[in-house]
Amino acid sequence: MSGCGSHTSIFSDTMQKHTPPQPLSRNRRKLLNKPWITQALYKSIKDKNKIYRSLVKNGFENKVKFAYYKRYRNQLTHLLVLSKKEYYQSQVLIARNDSAKTWKFINTLLPGRTKDTSTLPIQLHLHI
């Protein structure tokens, strides 16, 4: 029985060595940067895109399907806005009593800042 375990570990080690992990797709990386998007919302986004592709394929001729798509899209957009709002409200509540956490959260919302100030022109107007 112990021989079976060693074969399994050898097989597992060989698989990990010769099959590197797949890099995340651009869409998956974007999704990870948006923690308010749940798996259910992600699935709904995929479904919406699938409906849209079928509409494009048929030239938007099916008016009933187009009306369904618009309603689905609008409901999904509404759910995404609500989910994002709830996420940020919960993050503010978590950090409300700790100023360091509050500022860390605020800084995550701000766009990145460059640390290289040498590219900024500095003009001094000295009047002596």
Image (cartoon, rainbow, N blue to C red):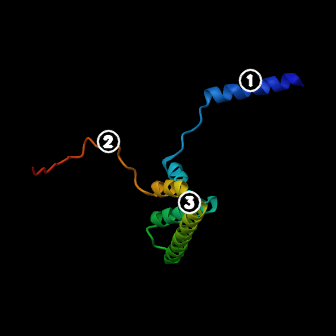
Provide residue 78's location: percent of width, then percent of height.
53, 73
Is residue 49 positioned above or below 66 on the image? above
> Pointer 2: residues within 10 angstroms few (<14), some, or many (20+)?
few
Q: Which of marks 1 and 3 is nearer the N terminus?
A: 1
1 vs 2, front mark: 2
Q: Identify residue for label 2.
A: 116
Quadrant hosting residue 7 = top right
Provide residue 59's location: percent of width, then percent of height.
43, 68
Residue type, mark 2 in image: Asp
Which numbered dot is residue 120?
A: none
Quadrant hosting residue 6 = top right
Q: Which residue is drawn at 55% across and 74% down?
A: 75
Front one among 110 and 60 = 110
Q: Which residue is drawn at 68% across and 25% down?
A: 14
- Which type of secondary structure does the marked residue at label 2 adopt? loop
Provide residue 58's location: percent of width, then percent of height.
47, 66
Q: Identify residue for label 3.
A: 46
Q: Identify residue for label 1.
A: 10
Front one among 58 and 40 = 40
User: Disc 1 vs disc 3: Cβ atoms closer than 8 Å?
Assistant: no
3 vs 2, front mark: 2
Residue type, mark 3 in image: Lys
User: Disc 3 vs disc 2: Cβ atoms closer than 8 Å?
Assistant: no
Provide residue 68's location: percent of width, then percent of height.
54, 75
Disc 3 from disc 2: Cα separation: 40 Å
- Which type of secondary structure does the marked residue at label 3 adopt? helix
Is residue 44 positioned above or below 8 on the image? below
Instruction: Specify whether 41 is left or right of 58.
Output: right
